[in-house]
Amino acid sequence: MSVVRRKSRADKRKRNTNILHKDRRANTLQELEIKTDVKETNLLVWVKNPLIATNCYPLREAVRQALEKASITRVILNMEHVPYADTTGICLLIEFHRQFLKDKITFIVYRMCPRVKEIIEILNLNGILTLRDH
């Protein structure tokens, strides 16, 4: 006769939390989708997915390459599909602002989601960055 061990509540809980942690880890690293377009003297940049430390370099490079190709007077960064930005992402926005101010290029952050906008307001950067919702 074989003895079947009955699963305890703790065993079930441990199994459920392991599944949750695996799912959470799988969903955290998302590549930043970047689309750029030059219209007249405007550089339009659409960004999708979280703006985090691992995703900042591709955005910086895409903007740099687009600026080298054409004479740009205005950069519009559409962050409508960016659900989150960490400190590195916020620092990248400040870096863009400083660089474009020095180069006399207007920098507009367009359609920021409420969560990111709240972070910008807490850091009191809404007076520094040009934010537009329409």
Image: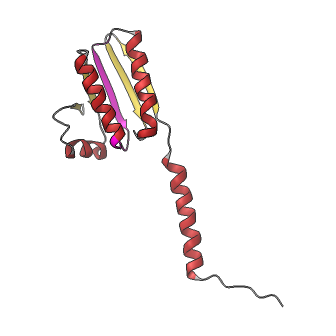
Residue found at the far bottom of this picture: 1
State the residue in front, 11 or 115: 11
The N terminus - image quarter = bottom right
The image position of residue 57, as x and y in percent, is 44, 30
> What range is drawn magenta here?
72-87
Q: Residue at x 77, y 88 (%)?
A: 3
The image position of residue 22, as x and y in percent, is 56, 58
Residue 39 belongs to the span the image colors magenta: no
In this image, 111 relative to 33: left or right? left
Q: Residue at x 41, y 16 (%)?
A: 66
Q: Residue at x 19, y 37 (%)?
A: 126
Residue 79 belongs to the span the image colors magenta: yes
The image position of residue 70, as x and y in percent, is 38, 9
The C terminus - image quarter = top left
Could you tell me if residue 110 is visible in this image?
Answer: no
In this image, 78 relative to 123: left or right? right
The image position of residue 58, as x and y in percent, is 46, 29
**Quadrant position of residue 11:** bottom right
In this image, 86 relative to 120: left or right? right
Tell me how many marks there are. 0
Residue found at the far left of this picture: 127
Could you tell me if residue 60 is visible in this image?
Answer: yes
